[in-house]
């Protein structure tokens, strides 16, 4: 079951990138922005401790 879900996810990802590249780029940009904001929050927290 796990293997089937993994392949379904890969197929969806390929389909999404192939047929909706602008939307896929926006999703990746949003994820990167969120990760950056989380990292910035941790850095601010650590700087506040020091």
Image (cartoon, rainbow, N blue to C red):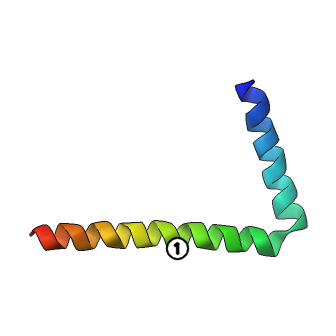
Q: In the displayed structure, does residue 42 sit left or right of residue 9?
A: left
- In which quarter of the view is residue 22 placed? bottom right
The C terminus, quarter of image: bottom left
Q: Which residue is pictured at 70% across the width and 74% down the height?
A: 26
Q: Quadrant of residue 32?
A: bottom right
The relative height of residue 11 versus residue 7 in the rendered view (above or below) is: below
Give x and y (percent) for residue 31. 58, 66
- Quadrant in the rendering for residue 18: bottom right
Pointer 1 local density, CA inside 10 Å: few below 14, some 14–19, many at least 20: few
33 sits left or right of 39 in the view: right
Residue at image x 79%, y 37%?
7
- The residue furthest top is 1
Q: Is residue 20 left or right of residue 44?
A: right
Q: Is residue 42 above or below residue 3?
A: below
Residue 44 horizontal/vertical position (percent): 25, 74
Q: Secondary structure at mark 1?
A: helix
The location of residue 33, given as percent across then percent down, is 52, 73
Provide residue 46's location: percent of width, then percent of height. 19, 67
Residue drawn at 84 percent across, 46 percent down: 11
The total of numbered circles placed on residues is 1
Quadrant the N terminus occupies: top right
Extreme-left residue of the structure: 50
> For mark 1, what is the residue?
33
In the rendered structure, the answer to whether residue 31 lies left or right of residue 2 reads left
**Rendered residue at 86%/68% (across/down):** 20
């Amino acid at each position: 079951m796990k293997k089937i879900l993994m392949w379904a996810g890969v197929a969806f990802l390929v389909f999404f990138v192939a047929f909706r590249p602008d939307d896929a780029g926006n999703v990746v940009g949003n994820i990167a922005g969120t990760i950056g904001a989380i990292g910035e929050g941790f850095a601010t927290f650590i700087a506040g401790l020091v």
